[in-house]
Image: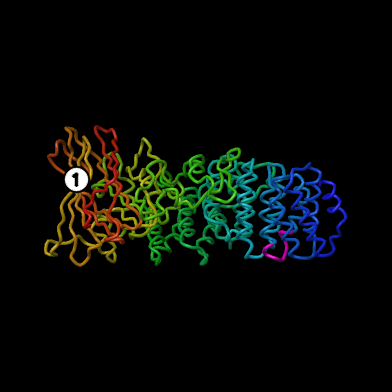
Amino acid sequence: MNDILAQVATKIESNKTIGNAILYECVQTIMSIQDSGGLRVLAINILGKFLSHRDNNIRYVGLNMLMKVVTADVQAVQRHRATILECIKDSDVSIRRRALELVCILVNETNVKALTKELVDYLEVSDPDFRVDLTEKICSIVSKYSSEKIWYIDQMLKVLSEAGNYVKDEVWHALIVVISNASELHGYTVRALYKAFQRSAEQETLVRVAVWCIGEYGEFLINNDGMLDVEDPIRVTESDVVHVVEIALKRHSLDITTKAMTLVALLKLSSRFPSFSERIREIVVQYKGNFVLELQQRSIEFNLIMAKHQNIRSTLVERMPVLDEATFIARRAGSLPDAASTPTNGVAKAVAPIVDLLDINSDDAPIPSSSGGDLLHDLLGVNISLAAQQSDAAQPSENGTDVLLDLLSIGSPSAPNELPAQGNSSTIDILSPKPSKKAPLSPLDDLASLSPSRTTLNAGASPLVESLDGFVPSPPTEESNELVYPSITAFESSSLRLVFNFSKQPGNLQTTNIRATFTNLTSNVYTDFVFQAAVPKFLQLHLNPASGNILTASGKESITQNMRLTNSQHGKKSLVMRIKVSYKINGKETLEEGQINNFPREL
């Protein structure tokens, strides 16, 4: 049989359709029998000739067959790699896609750099319809086989510069994680992004990564810190850096996430470049009347920080802590096609959308991850649902624990004109540094681990906020003929009891008014009492200030706190809530957490 197959394979003419049909069947037979490698190589060479044929059908058949036989003799197929790469540039979209899939199979540690260069070069001239697939495959290859972080960063910047608008969110999330962990490359990366932004400012994903890096490491641009041998020094002034970020902010095509990230970068630059703080404040304040509440709130709060709190600004906007690369990868392993589940030499793999990190993609999953938090979400601060209230926020404690709430003027009757607009934001997550011995901050710093996705934040406004176009409605009055429901013990431990009392307005059954009563069950006094809560995306939670922040011993006096919970799936889904309570006993902080599932069904 081997002799007959070899004779047919070598003597049949391939310039006619019938001859190619016979050769195809010959290859099929060779690959289906147990044979020495020599005959298989002959069959694969025949398929290689098919790839050079003028007929599109024959080229497609050749690629399709190579996809099937590549596992039998990958080295023989590798010899036709150049021809396969040429097929990626074919005018026929089916041939292009099939050739791209075959190239991804042929990639290994030895040829990854050469193949990636070919694909990136073609990315510059590829059709827009093909760029989505091409960028996805390039990112997958780079993430899977990169052995050096600098090479990974270089390739990703090339992709973002050429086709950043076609790149998925998980790609630039992973890139930021890698950059965060590559401390020796911070200077190199921010300079590369600065230059790339000037060439490709229309690529929105590139702009996001660029403004994030400039906000974190902007001073490296001025001083040329961390120069590598492959770099040439660049002359950049503080004015140039601020100007670049200002350009990003004023581009009308950029979406809310990008603009929000840019405002954060400007706030951080105001601390990095004190001489340009006033200019930056003038840029930021332009958005205080923006129709987008996310941007409006950031503008008002950031302006307040720069105008009145210079003494603590540097602490508030210090660099983000290094993102946990191992945890980030482990949670999203294998979410991209062909992506490896583990890093290679410390390079992060591309991951699925960052919002999935909290594992609440469905309405049925109300509880966010209680460990680790979502550092990127804290970084971006966009579309995070969070409800937290510092008790007695209007009176900062002696040791400065309420300095952040005082800074944001939440619940402060002395500053009615400085209240931030309530909106879809999580600015607290962005501003919260690690507590220091000199000025420890509120336990709100730890709220990132409670943050679910895509609902609203109301960080406990005072009654004065009611004047801001009704952002926080007044609680029902006694004359409103409320519907009252049975109370429940929502949470109880050996040291604390939490009781919920419920009421509704007759005409608005979706909204439940809750009065929370906290009772101390021990003989110790609790100070700096804070209640925090999180709900799934089908709920909206509005939290009012607590009646105090000191909980007396043995239940002599209780702390009460009102909240309003709106259920968009009323009648279909029950209420559920994740809570966290923190307090201090003789200066030592205590934390209690729990999940409340026993809400009355009629709510």
The image quarter in which residue 303 lies? bottom left
Q: Is residue 586 left or right of residue 371?
A: left
The location of residue 88, given as percent across then percent down, is: 71, 59
Q: Residue at x 67, y 49 (%)?
A: 105
Magenta part of the chain? 87-94
Is residue 311 visible to the viewer in this orientation of the structure? Answer: no
Q: Secondary structure at mark 1?
A: strand
Q: Residue furthest right?
A: 11
Q: Nearer the viewer, residue 303 or 392?
A: 392
The location of residue 542, given as percent across then percent down, is: 28, 56
Q: Is residue 312 left or right of residue 600?
A: right
Q: Nearer the viewer, residue 83 or 184?
A: 83
Q: Which residue bears the numbered disc 1?
A: 489
The image quarter in which residue 397 lies? top left
Mark 1 crowd level (few <14, some 14–19, many ≥20, 10 Å Cα): some
> How is the protein colored in the picture?
rainbow
Q: Nearer the viewer, residue 415 or 11?
A: 11
Is 91 magenta? The answer is: yes
Q: How many marks?
A: 1
Q: Nearer the viewer, residue 259 or 53?
A: 53
Q: Is residue 53 above or below residue 338?
A: below
Q: Is residue 416 left or right of residue 209?
A: left
The location of residue 470, given as percent across then percent down, is: 27, 65
The location of residue 478, given as percent across then percent down, is: 12, 61
Q: Is residue 42 above or below residue 131?
A: above
Q: Is residue 585 left or right of residue 196?
A: left
Is 131 magenta? The answer is: no
Q: Amino acid at mark 1?
A: Thr
In the rendered view of the protein, which quadrant contains the C terminus?
bottom left
Q: Is residue 245 above or below residue 77?
A: below
Is residue 455 visible to the viewer in this orientation of the structure? Answer: yes
